[in-house]
Image (tube, helix red, strand yellow):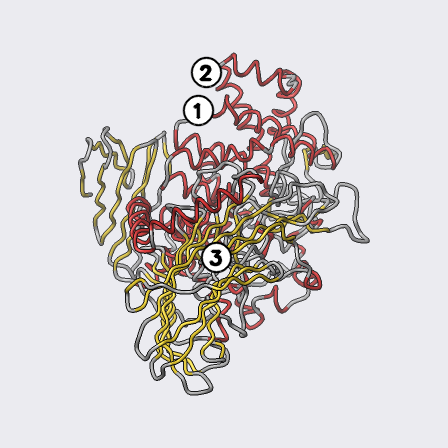
Amino acid sequence: MKNYIKHDPWCIIEEGFAADYNEITESLTSLGNGRMGQRGNFEERFSGKTLLGNYVAGVFYPDKTRVGWWKNGYPRYFAKVLNACNWIGIDIDIEGETLDLATCEVSEYTRVLNMKEGILERKFVATLASGKQVRVHAQRFCSIVDDEAGAIRYAITPLNFDGKITLVPSLNGDISNKDSNYGEKFWDEIHKETSFGEAYLEMRTKDTPFKTELFNVCTGMKIDLKIDGKKVDFQSLPVKEEKCVACRIILNAKTNEEIALYKYAVNLASLNHSVEELLPNAKVYTNRIFKKGFEQMKAEQIQAWAERWAQNDIIIEGDDAAQQGIRFNIFQLEQTYTGEDDRLNIGPKGFTGEKYGGSTYWDTEAYCLPFYLATADQKVARNLLVYRYKHLQKAIENAQMLGFKDGAALYPMVTMTGEECHNEWEITFEEIHRNGAIAYAIYDYIRHTDDEAYLGEYGLEVLIAVSRFWAQRVNWSSDKQKYVMLGVTGPNEYENNVNNNWYTNYLAAWCLRFTLESIAKVELQNPAALAAIYERVGFNAATETAKWSQVVENMYYPYDAERQVFLQQDGFLDKELLTVEDIAAQRPINQRWSWDRILRSCFIKQADVLQGLYFFEDEFDIETIRRNFDFYEPMTVHESSLSPCVHVILAAMLGYNEKAYEMYLRTSRLDLDDYNNDTEDGLHITSMAGTWMSVIKGFAGMRIKNGSLSFTPFLPTQWQGYSFRITFKKQVVRIGVRRGEVEVENLSNEPLQIMINDNVLHLEAHQSQTV
């Protein structure tokens, strides 16, 4: 665990250049706006440790995966988010010496990500080998108002000399991904041009045998210059190189005179613009933001973030580390997904790195949806569900390739287009619980919004296809006289190819039950819609629902009668049952043990049985949950970012307050303190929604009971208080928790009923009560 980031309630602060941790800090200071994102790389050239990263939403490359052990049904390709044109570059030459923080002496260095305003700022003094000193003050942001644009103000001041300074702002498309094979590059140059103070570079993803969509991205820039705050005339010499365009500006600099370069840039993709209009639109867009100017764009950015924070902030009193942690998580979620486009989703690394391909996982439905349900307009969460509906036919095709039939759907573990593109067989074929997470998301959305019309429009068709898959995936065991599910991998990926994973079996039966209930609901509310769905999917109601009911009633669940706990899977008790304390010096085991040793151990990567108890806690009594938590938690190494938040929620419910707080710090500061030694690859965006759940569902105990919000809050001893807002069925409520009291404020125009510690409160519009 690292602890070099200064604790601050609103900022991520690096004081003093931590060169060895630079890739970590680049991840932590990443910026985004839902359409594009940029790691916290330096504008000037840097020859030290760095991971360049600029990403455009929805743009990917189908990298080849076919190798010697390829089998029928195996994905054709691995979709990866591409490192796109580097738009932030500004090379600095000082009388023949390159400004490079890896080769000069650096002092007075700070890098600050202001989360309140969405602005990254860097200040330092550099002493070159010649002894010349310059002060640099750089600011940049990805605009969430103009969401295909970014802006930079890069100011350099000579401190002890007069002389020539050359600035070369560039657009560089000659880049590759970190995981490229032998430095392979994935972009072809289509067009480039420069004129005075501006340049444009259009690139296209390389063609492949997979016949997926090719993407064009046009990156444009326009520059301006001020000296000591006054706009000046300057000469801009055009530069054209392979996959690169730039402007060279040579200035006679004077001591203590600030030269400020303003760089306005856009990234327009063929996902949103026709190929023919891409370049003209980029020019129009670039000129529009240039006319706005940096200060107006910055003011709009600050205002837009203020509106977001007013809706989604969690305020923690008395603990800067905890406050910084939760705001960092919320900030990155807001940067990654805005809900404006139902073709987009939330990659595990968002716009902060390339690991996991940048594609959609089950994390969205299991972890992210609750955050957007409670903090954003209803359409945002709805679009996340519509995204899956639009991929339903692909999910059916994915299942067909594995031998399933009659409209059964298996949603992909990893996807960009709905087609499975994950390249590890034990996950691709066996981690089928993702189907259940998508069904659960439909259930969660409806109970949170009362948007039951969604079932008739989209949801029921998805549920029927998923249920058809489960009905075919189980088989009858004459030995057990139960339905069983063989050869699966649960959320805990430290156990592969197991039989009767408890979580997967329980989730499958629940899906079938929920689909039967949803059919009955749509039949009552909209029989015409039900008839249309039956016709569209060829549904035999009598035969199929009878089979589903039979599976629900006769599903097998592994259980240890002596300990009275559910078993992860058949044979779990054959393992040597150790605790995490027994191997403390050997962690993280995924970096120190062989895969063979991990698979034979009892150690759990992430909550599995406990994930099921979190989802379906209303179906189990408190002592059952306690026994399973006490049995499994000591064996859990939490080497998945998705694990700690589930433990926070269950620990809080069980009254294990110190354990809940320990796990909260782990999830909220997972990346800030680099718990798992992997932050340099990018942030854990989807698990950040789990951090939000840790506070709201964990410490505040938020649940939905009988159609109303319910809270059973506790206050960690390290805090003086905390407060937050929740949107529920289009009503907004603010909850404030302090020692001995809870304040509830109805911020809506309609009356509200809410429960606090099983006490029912009735609040009129804009009324508050303290309990």
Helix, strand or loop at mark 2: helix
Distance between the alpha carbons at the discs numbered 2 and 3: 47 Å
**Residue 352 as seen in the image, left or right of residue 141:** right
Please report the residue visible at 62 percent of the width from the left and 18 percent of the height from the top: 536
Please report the residue visible at 65 percent of the width from the left and 23 percent of the height from the top: 547
Helix, strand or loop at mark 1: loop
Numbered mark located on residue 38 in the image: 3
Q: Is residue 408 above or below residue 114?
A: above
Query: Pointer 1: what residue?
Result: 452
**Residue 434 as seen in the image, left or right of residue 342:** right
Helix, strand or loop at mark 3: strand
Q: Evaluate whether residue 697 shows in this view.
A: no
Query: Dividing the picture into quarters, in which one does residue 525 lie?
Result: top left
Numbered mark located on residue 525 in the image: 2
The amino acid type found where label 3 is placed reads Gln
Q: Quadrant of the C terminus?
A: top left
Crowd rating for badge 1 (residues with CA inside 10 Å; few <14, some 14–19, many 20+)? some
Q: Are marks 2 and 1 in contact (CB under 8 Å)?
A: yes
Residue 265: percent from left, percent from top:
45, 54
> First in sequence: mark 2 or mark 1?
1
**Residue 313 as seen in the image, left or right of residue 270:** left
> First in sequence: mark 3 or mark 1?
3
Please report the residue visible at 60 percent of the width from the left and 65 percent of the height from the top: 589
Q: Is residue 262 above or below residue 507?
A: below
Crowd rating for badge 2 (residues with CA inside 10 Å; few <14, some 14–19, many 20+)? some
Residue 83: percent from left, percent from top:
57, 56
The amino acid type found where label 1 is placed reads Glu
Distance between the alpha carbons at the discs numbered 3 and 1: 39 Å
In front of the other: 555 or 327: 327
Please report the residue visible at 75 percent of the width from the left and 41 percent of the height from the top: 73
Residue 321: percent from left, percent from top:
34, 64
> First in sequence: mark 2 or mark 3?
3
